[in-house]
Image (spheres, grey):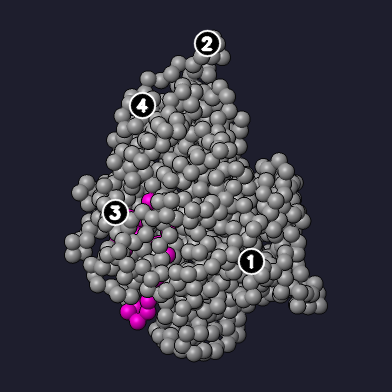
Amino acid sequence: MTAIAQSGLACPMPLPTADRVQLGHGSGGKLSAALIGGLFMRQLDNPALAQMGDGAVVTAGATDLVVSTDSFVVSPLEFPGGDIGSLAVHGTLNDVAMMGARPLCLTAGFVLEEGLPMATLERIVASMAQAARLAGIPIVAGDTKVVERGKADGLYVNTTGIGLLHPHCRPGPRGARAGDVVIVSGALARHGMAIMAAREGFNFESTITSDSACLVPLVDLLTASGVEVHVLRDPTRGGVASALNEIAAASHVAMVLEEEALPVPDNVRAACEMLGFDPLYVANEGVMLAIVPASDAARTLDALRSHPLGRDAVSIGRVTGSPPGTVILRTALGGTRIVDLLPGDQLPRIC
Amino acid sequence: MCLGIPGRVVELHNDGGFPTGLVDFGGVRREVCLAYVAGEVALGDYVIVHVGFAISKVDEAEAKRTFEVLREMSRLDELEWIADAIEPSPGEPRDALSAGNGRPR
Amino acid sequence: MKYLSEYRDPAIARALIERIRRTATRPWTLMEVCGGQTHTIVRQGLDELLDGAVEMIHGPGCPVCVTPLEQIDKALALAARPDVIFTSFGDMLRVPGSDCDLQQVRARGGAVRVVYSPLDALELARRTPDKEVVFFAVGFETTAPANAMAVWRARELGVRNFSVLVSHVTVPPAITAILNAPDNRVQGFLAAGHVCAVMGWTEYEPIAEQYRVPIVVTGFEPMDILEGMLMAVDQLESGRHVVENQYVRSVRREGTVPARERVEDVFELADRNWRGIGEIPMSGLRLRKEFMEFDAERKFGVAGITVNEPAECRAGDVLTGRLKPPKCGAFGTRCTPEHPLGALMVSAEGACAAYYNLARHRMAEPQEVTA
């Protein structure tokens, strides 16, 4: 389960009065946090789960393993830059890698909707196979179920990953310290806007492609460089804003981001402007946040930029002491504003 | 009322008398209804688009002129500040900015 | 992006801020009427940067926020019907009705779809002839031409399964209502740039003259808003009160005539209830008789719906500038974006949400519950 920390406002947050699950509960924002904290944790609480990292650490004898699971429900199934299959492989490999762990293997469970064209399934599974092959990680177990027409958006996938924890490089959401630098490995908001542009009802033509990619090589470069990595996180649903809010809350620190430093490609920015989206909240699937001591910032950037996936790596802000759990953005004009968790998904607006 | 974004008309279409066009917004393109600006818009022109409709044409000449005025103002202000620091003067000079299209400054 | 990004130039913005501070010999109070302008002001911290020189009061410029409760409840009733696909702009989905919102109706099985343009809703109607497609036609004058065209095209193409739930409001009557209030403190207005791109600014000239207030038609980028403020302050300092145009690249005095004509063809003025404010005569639009077949209220008989607004929501006072959101007793405690009491806390442009999400760290007396 991807890490969801409590919102900085009220801890634990009461469930909203809604008596049914809503789409917002899956957005990675406050509703998600409330659902996980208020319902799941309440029922399932145990020490490993309570770590609330991208994956859980489980010890088997003298060996520390990492386990992480993720479900993928993206629509459309195929989009510029990837598909649900490659997304599912990259997503879980990345979750394992964000713990500083070396992925060993993956499993894949499929829920197929009756009527899904075989050709589509073939393409998606081929894509998964290729993604796994390129990463050098086998898919060792799987499961397939079929449900009636209308009960799954074509296809849902769950992948679970197991990895071997690094002997001493063990980043975690509680690791950020005042004075640290916040670094992002590449351009932001590509995946979310690629999906939006491809959605029916919006009819945008764009050159935006998803950044879906396996980040293991970048993590390897960091761990080999000797940098003291405090936090690693892939900012997926909810974007950089949600990820940093969770980390700020878990680490009891604040963060100050510089608007001018945020690397948003022009075509992504254009799409965001049209729909009224803030790129900070848009999902990324091939980018990671690294929070490191200031003295290690230059070495971190060098390591990341030495790889094609990290060539646009840049520092976007700093960790400060207070107010804890707050993420603030300094605008190009010198003003400041809070970057908070959103309650649910961003919605396209006219206003 | 608000989310009106400037884009460049890159294609003109005609759906049985209903004027539409492909508008480019810095890399993202969308089909836009041009019915309200049909008489005045040509390929390459910029329009303000709100919920899939061009609601007005961007006056590029005006935009350029007033932008230059503002840029000049910000440079003049810097010079003034420097001048004031060397030799303080009472009250600041007002720019004689040209009038036109509702800007009688 | 051309004609957008350059208006975010920090050097020019800082120069404008300096200019405003030097021009103002005393603090002035201005109101911006457009939610998009409110968003830029709070998002960029412009009110913080101009503290002491200009006080910005945020006006009722968010059509989402002022959509009357009864229209939301009608929307909810329509969306819950199994034969209806209810389409809407994204902003409306989380606005609370008397007992729930459109997202909750969707969770309970209603077909609710977000569209970018009203023409997308019409297209959906053409593609799904066995369903009724209803479009929530909200907005100010900026959006009226789009909604008018959707209805016009529906008639032209003979589409029978398309209708609109109308909730349009117009700006000038709201400005007049604010100026008429005995406790009004607003000394000048930034008029909404895109409303004026459509309508022009002739309607504002009598207001400026009668009430002796400067009105500056202003754009939405930081540089636009700052320049608009400077022009307003300039007028106030020199005792002038006319309509001026800052947003010259997009607005002309006569507006976009074909758009105004199409709105005239399809809609007519009507009295309208503004959520939180009350009824303002002739401040709304309704479909003309000739287009009544496209009126969702008539088609589905949802006209008589009773409403139930939480008494604690002080949207009306916020919308007319009497109350700054952080001073509301419920702000950040009983009323938050997750449990909004009123529309201003839901819409991205609502003044309350803007303060809560973006600026509460600057508030002198924070009211939210902290961990």
- Secondary structure under tag 2 reads loop
Residue in the image at 34% along x and 72% along y: C162
**Residue, disc 3:** C264
Q: Which amino acid lies under the numbered mark 4 shown in the image of this protein?
A: Pro
Contact between marks 2 and 1 (CB within 8 A): the answer is no
Mark 2 vs mark 1, CA separation in Å? 59 Å
Mark count: 4
Label 3 amino acid?
A: Glu
Q: Which mark is residue A31?
A: 1
Picture layout, residue B71 above or below residue A326: above
Query: Which-is-in-front pick, marks 1 and 4?
Result: 4
Residue that numbered label 4 is attached to: B104
Residue extent of the magenta highlight: C128-150
Q: Are marks 1 and 4 on the same chain?
A: no
| Cα–Cα gap, marks 1 and 4 | 51 Å
Residue C58 placement (x, y as % from top left): 54, 43
Q: Which residue is mark 2?
A: B89
